[in-house]
Amino acid sequence: MDTQYETVIGLEVHVQLRTHSKMFCSCGADYQLMPPNTRVCPVCLALPGTLPVVNSRAVEDAIKIGLALNCKVAETTKFDRKNYAYPDLMKGYQISQYDVPICYDGYMDLPGDPSSRIGIERVHMEEDVARLIHIPGQDGEAGHTLMDVNRAGVPLMEVVSRPDLRTTDQVEAYISNLQMIIRYIDVGTANMEEGSFRCDANVSIRPAGSTKLGAKVEIKNMNRIRAVTRALEYEIARQTEDVKAGNRVVQETRGWDDEVGVTVSQRSKEDAHDYRYFPEPDLPPLRIGASLVDHIRSELPELPALRKDRFQQSWGLPEYDAALLTSSRTTADYFEQVVRSVGAMAKGEMSAFAKETANWLNGEMARHMNNDGTTNVFDTRIRPENLAVLVGRFGRRELNNAGAKQVFGEMYRSGADADDVIEQQGLQQVSDTSELDPVADEVIQANPSAVRDYLGGKKTAVRFLVGQVMKATRALEAEPLMKELFEYRFTEGNGLAGHSFGNLFIAAMSGVTGNFEQAVSESSRVLKVTGRIVPSTLWTFG
């Protein structure tokens, strides 16, 4: 973006509600997987003599959205007819809201940027339109268009921001956060790819420092967040180039061509008077009581931004982990069930356990769910309290990394308890040096040259000895423990008389020289060179 100019962006987001029936009739709203034109009735087909009836659940969901966006709720609201001619509009008009929307004057604070408060102009109710399927012609023949009326009349909420966005990064954060809010309050899927969450962008540029708005261009046909940001980047560059060339930016609607990466002019941008709004004569105004609003407010869940902050403060999670967990309400709920199932812990221990739990949920759990298409963590076979057992045992290093992943995979597949899988598959690793001492003794006796190399100053020789113990015990994650054990044994003043190190070292040298007296002599020489003295009281070999 040229610093001579400032970008001004406002977004209009259409949110399909997940109600059982349509906005103004009793037809099922589950149109996505149904055969064409099977979720229709005289009302949504707009047959003469039919009358609309308002879906009360849709009204409540609209209030939920408004409250989650810090909006005021109108005491009285009404519906209006929005008149325009388009083939997907069954009645020749759309029942929408114009001058008295159900919610208004709200705001959203962008996550990670508390200074960026984006105003919410309004949230209003309307109905979706039919779906058009364009079939191209073949062999020079003209194409044709099919119509599926299943979607017509599905409840649609439009969330209109004020023109407070300035960058595509802010746009991305706004859309992502709005999606999370819609999913948290459980009023819709907010899935852009399936069309249940659609975004139109209004963008203009103006000289830096100016407060006057320029001619705005509306961009449509964007079905994912990246498409929105790409379309805006292109349009900002196009408008800047036009202005620099001395041309006037035309107020119009442009469509985004994702394959080519350009916006294409579609029609001149309509103003409100072009739609000839007037009150819907078949629907009376709605009075919304304060008690209903208070009841809906009391049922709102903790929203993602607040929950992320609490996860950082209460559980000691890094911002990255907290953001990943709270991006899904079900995953955040599952996480809290895991950490609360272990009871009281010291704060430091609980923070470590919470971090390890986050690692497993954001890592292995997410990977397995992506592989089999599961979207809700509670639909997996792993119970929260069972994952807590695995996380605890892994945190105490009773399992190595590979073994823990193996256990998790079996738990995910069968729902088995972590303890049972560990026992059945023999995956508990050695974590006590007393269990490793006898094996270490055998390794030292069997590998005299490695012992001599280490004591002669070749520190890497200890890796070979550690590897032999790990091979014998299958204690794959015991390497740090074994390295510490060997270094402890090979250091003077660490209770050598309590170990058989002196005897074992002489034995090792005996294996090299084949002669006990020569071994004692060679041992003394090596130990003097390395500064290590084996007390003569240990020379009781044989």
Image (tube, grey):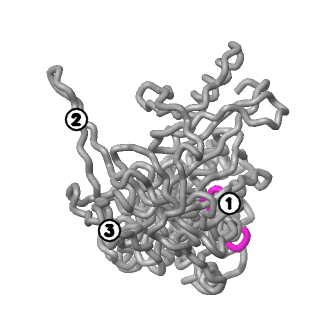
Q: Within 10 angstroms of label 3, few (less than 14), some, or many (20 or more) residues?
A: some
Where's residue 296, x and y in %? 59, 80
Q: Earlier in the sequence, mark 1 or mark 3?
A: 3
The magenta stretch spans residue 371: no
Seen from this angle, which residue lies furthest left?
139
Q: Earlier in the sequence, mark 3 or mark 2?
A: 3
Find numbered disc 3 in the image and state the secondary structure of the residue it sits on. Answer: loop
Say what amino acid the circle numbered 2 marks: His
Which residue is denoted by mark 1 in the rendering? 318
- Residue 274 found in image quarter: top right
Seen from this angle, which residue lies furthest right?
209
What distance separates the C-alpha of mark 2 from that of mark 1?
55 Å
Mark 3 or mark 2, whichever is nearer to me: 3
What distance separates the C-alpha of mark 1 from that of mark 3?
57 Å
Q: Earlier in the sequence, mark 2 or mark 1?
A: 2
Q: Within 10 angstroms of label 1, few (less than 14), some, or many (20 or more) residues?
A: some
Are the residues at dot 3 and dot 2 in contact (C-beta closer than 8 Å)?
no
Q: Nearer the viewer, residue 507 or 374?
A: 374
The answer to whether residue 518 is seen in the rendering is: no
Mark 2 or mark 1, whichever is nearer to me: 2
Q: Which residues are magenta?
A: 313-323
Residue 99 located left or right of residue 362: right
Where's residue 137, x and y in %? 20, 28
Say what amino acid the circle numbered 1 marks: Pro
The magenta stretch spans residue 318: yes
Which residue is denoted by mark 2 in the rendering? 144
Q: Is residue 403 above or below residue 208?
A: below
